[in-house]
Every structure is written in structure tokens, then in C-alpha cells.
Image (tube, rainbow, N blue to C red):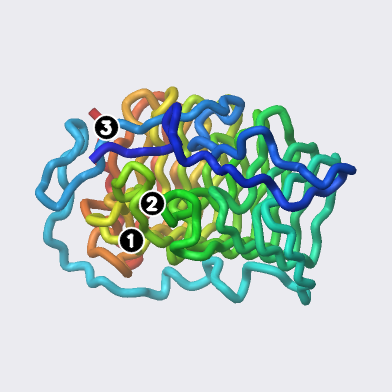
Amino acid sequence: MSRLRACAAGLALLLAAGCSGSAGSSSADRAPSTLDRPPVAADPSSASPSVRTTPSPSPSGSTPATHGPSAKPSARATTVTSLEAGFPNAGTTGPRTALKPHSTGNMSIKADGTVIKGWDIKGSLDIYADNVTIVDSRITSTNWWGVNLRPGFHGLRVLHTTITAVPGKGPDNGGVDYAVSNMGASSIEVGWCDISVFGNALSMGQGNIHDNYVHDLVPFRNAGGEWQHTDAVISGGGNSGRLIIRHNTLLNPVDVERGASASIGLFADTGHVSNTVIDNNLLAGGAYALYGGGEGATGITVTNNVFSTRYHRNSGVYGSVTAWNAGSGNVWRGNRYADGTPVTPEPAG
């Protein structure tokens, strides 16, 4: 099964409807000329669609050529342990204040420095401006994304916000793809957010992702009729800046037969994966809990993470980690299963 990561050229499901509101502009019609779905973030300066061709492991045992199956019997129980305490949850993420309803629809923001605070939004936010902050809010989307930063813009911060969607109501054959998508050429910050439903929850090649609770991803068949692959965090490679993923709870409960890919997926879709920090996260679920970037990955640091067995005895269906390059300045240290057993990566190649 091929991995469809973005709408292919000429995809007939481009949205015909425009945005229903805008911040920082005078016209009532704020829709971009084509309200296209953002691609999976690789080098975020690239806004072109991409199609992933590397298959995920299947229950029949057909794994990628470089990834041997790892679903070996284990004495580890499928359970939640004390090592999982202290990671972000519903009580430590999301808005801290009362919210005011805003029926914005799918809204474009075009004024630099816009601050959205305390809003309960039924719609999505498409960012065509610098230094926009979304804080202490709730976004319920039926668009391709919850929040999307467009190419050429920078400085987006999404903090203490709940970002979710309505299953079956999204444009991708009823599904929704990205809670936060960074199509820009600079880092963004996503912190203390409660994120659910979206197939690829946090999609970016560079950014600071910290203290978030990503959970309850919802599987769906995409516009091509295939199960959309699901990842709590996904990066497509070719990034020019740094990606930091620190102290998050990243859960992917989706069955592998229905598209589960990873909790963190570092895929070399459009270039080598590089300059990425994965530190002190709680990971669970996916075909593998972590895809490590593959043979060409450089500057990847994976430290002090807990690989939960709450869904599968090896954290992911086929194992905890695959596609790990043990050279090229990459660091693997202090990673363990939730019972304290050290996690040993499966090498790339």
C-alpha cells in the first residue's frame, strides 16, 4: 500500500468553497485562489504536493526492504506503568481560560502580529502573516488542517490550545489531515496543546514541539481510496532548520490494518532527515513507534524517551524503532520501554 502524503497534481478534490472570514483585511472574501491541502512538511519552504511511495509493514509480513519485522514475542505486558506518569495529558494541555464562541468558518489571517486568544472556533486558520499567536483557544475543524502556516511567513506560535476535528466531515473523503502544518521556511512553536482526530497531527520539517498531548487519531480512507497513514508527528526530510520534539505524549492507537504508521515518523520523502532532537517523550503505537530517518539521516538525537506498551508489546506493532542510522553524528541514549528495559534500535539498511 503506497503512502499518500498530499494531494497529487490534478487531484479533483480541491475545495471549491472559500474562507468565510479573515483577520486583518477589509474584504469579505478572503479565500486563497485555490484552498489546497498543504503537503506533508519536508523542507517547509516547499509547498508542492508529494506522494510517499515507501510502504508500511503489513500484517502478512511484507515489510519495506530495509526494515525487517520486529514483532517478536516478549514478556512485556501491554499496560501503563509508573514511568508514564508526568507526561502531558488532558489536565496539563489546552486552554486555561473561558472561551468565547467564534463561528469563523475557514479563516485566513493576513495581519502581522495577530493574536487570537480565548476563541472557540468552528473552522480552520490559514496563516498568511508573520508573528501570529494562537493561545488559550479551541479549534474544531472540518478542513484539511486546523492551523496552517503558508510559505514565506514565519513566527507562528500555537500555545495552550485544543485542536480537533469532526470525524467524517473533513474534505479528504471525510477525513482531516493536519492539526498544525508548517509550510513556512522557519521554525514555529507548538506547546501545551491538546490535539486529536487529525491523521497526521503535527506536520513540519522544523519547529519546536513541546509539552503537547496528541491522542485519539482517527483513521479514514483518503481520496485515493487507501487508508491514510497516521502519525502523531511527521516530517518529510529535506529540512533546512532544526526540529525539536521534547516532552510530549504522542499516542497513535490506530490499527495497522487501518493505516497506522508511527508516533514519530521521520521520513526521507523529499530529502535526507537532519538536525532533529527527540527528547523525553512518551511514545506509543504505530507500525513502529519511531521511524528514525533512514540511511541518509544526520544529526538526529534521540534521548530519554519512554516507549509505552499500552497498545502493543513492542510499543509499535512491529517494534519500537526502525530506519535508525547509527552513524553520521546521530545519538541514541537513555531510551527505554515503560518497564525500564532499554530500547535497542533496529538499524537502517
Residue 349 in percent (x, y) is at: 23, 28
Q: Which mark is residue 254?
A: 1
Check contact, mark 1 vs mark 2: CB within 8 A. Answer: yes
Q: Nearer the viewer, mark 2 or mark 3?
A: 2
Q: How many marks?
A: 3
Residue 259 shown left or right of residue 280 in the figure: left
| Element type at mark 3 | loop
Q: Residue at x 89, y 43 (%)?
A: 26
* Few, some or many residues within 10 Å of mark 1 (<14, 14–19, 20+): many
Q: Residue 270 sits in which quadrant?
A: top left
Q: Residue 193 sits in which quadrant?
A: bottom right
Identified by mark 2, the residue type is Thr
Identified by mark 3, the residue type is Ala
Residue 253 in percent (x, y) is at: 35, 64
Q: Counting residues from the N terminus, which is met first, the one under dot 3 or under dot 1?
A: 1
Residue 135 in percent (x, y) is at: 75, 59
Q: Residue 51 sits in which quadrant?
A: top left
Residue 13 in percent (x, y) is at: 47, 41
Residue 74 shown left or right of residue 41 in the figure: left
Location of the N terminus (image quadrant): top left
Q: Residue at x 80, y 57 (%)?
A: 116
Residue position for label 2: 230
Furthest toward the right, the residue is: 26
| Element type at mark 2 | strand
Q: Nearer the viewer, residue 98 or 225?
A: 225
Q: Nearer the viewer, residue 237 or 142?
A: 142
Q: Residue at x 50, y 35 (%)?
A: 39
Residue 296 visible in the current orientation: yes
**Depicted 267 relative to depicted 303: above or below:** above
Check contact, mark 2 vs mark 3: CB within 8 A. Answer: no
